[in-house]
Image: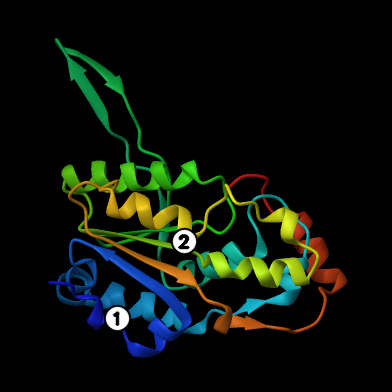
Amino acid sequence: MSTIHLVPDDLRQLYHVDEWRNAAGVLATACPAEWAEVIDVLRGFRLLRSEVEAAGGSKSPIASQIDGGFYARGWKEKQFQTAITLDGETFASPTHKIDCLKGRVALEVEWNNKDPFFDRDLNNFRLLFDLRAIDVGIIVTRGSELQAIFKSLGKGNSYGASTTHRDKLKPRIEGGGGGGCPVLTFAIRPELYVDDGPPSAEQVAAAAAMPLYE
């Protein structure tokens, strides 16, 4: 039985929400403090025209807006140091960095990466769940229908079909890409879009100074 009804109604109006292995139920019951913060950050997010239009590296102002909401609440970027021992010899095998981690909740923001990043995230969730390091994984991405907005702003070519959006994520979730790890995903709907005008000089400068890689 799905537990997606535990996601507040207002969030389901603003995001496409999908779950695997009753992730919403795990968050609500086993990680209530972290779940409350996820709800707060996602409620506060808005997709601003100025940030869509601002140039920058692969770490966009939009991803930084979401990450920043979690970092302000004490979430941290985290890489787990794991290793494999074979016949007495140990080989370091660190995990990929998680964008935001708090308690036993791992959260990734995939705004506009190449779609194989979803495979990396889900495999990381599976591994960390099997190692009993996390209880649940969350991915925040964009709804595929946002492409119409990007095209209207002359930014359609910046958001290709083979980048991270819901139509690329959902089949991977349903195909069991996360293994036994409960996974909850949020894909930004057009209802979150706000036309706040073109980017200011300060926004352009800030975007240009962002890291080249997430």
Image point (19%, 19%), residue name: 85
Above or below, 160 relative to 206: above
How dense is the environment of label 2, judged by Cα within 10 Å: few (below 14), some, or many (20 and up)? many
- Residue 65, percent across and down? 58, 70
Marks 1 and 2, how far apart in space? 18 Å
Above or below, 152 relative to 106: below
The residue positioned farthest toward the bottom in the image shown: 10
Which of the 4 image quadrants contains residue 184? bottom left
> Which residue is at the front of the view, 206 or 116?
116
- Residue 57, percent across and down? 71, 50
Q: Amino acid at mark 1?
A: Val
Image point (15%, 70%), residue name: 30
Which of the 4 image quadrants contains residue 199? bottom right
Secondary structure category for the residue under label 2: helix
Image point (36%, 53%), residue name: 171
| In-image side of 116 versus 83 (left or right) | right
Q: For mark 2, what is the residue? A: 166
Above or below, 90 relative to 131: above
- Residue 186, label in figure: none
Q: Amino acid at mark 2?
A: Arg
Image point (20%, 77%), residue name: 28
- Residue 4, percent across and down? 25, 76
Q: How is the image coloured?
A: rainbow
> Which residue is at the front of the view, 98 or 73?
98
Secondary structure category for the residue under label 1: loop
Front label number (1 vs 2):
2
Quarter of the image where the N terminus is located = bottom left
> Which residue is at the front of the view, 90 or 95?
95
Which tag, 1 or 2, sits closer to the chain's start? Answer: 1
Q: For mark 1, what is the residue? A: 7
How dense is the environment of label 1, judged by Cα within 10 Å: few (below 14), some, or many (20 and up)? some
Q: How many marks?
A: 2
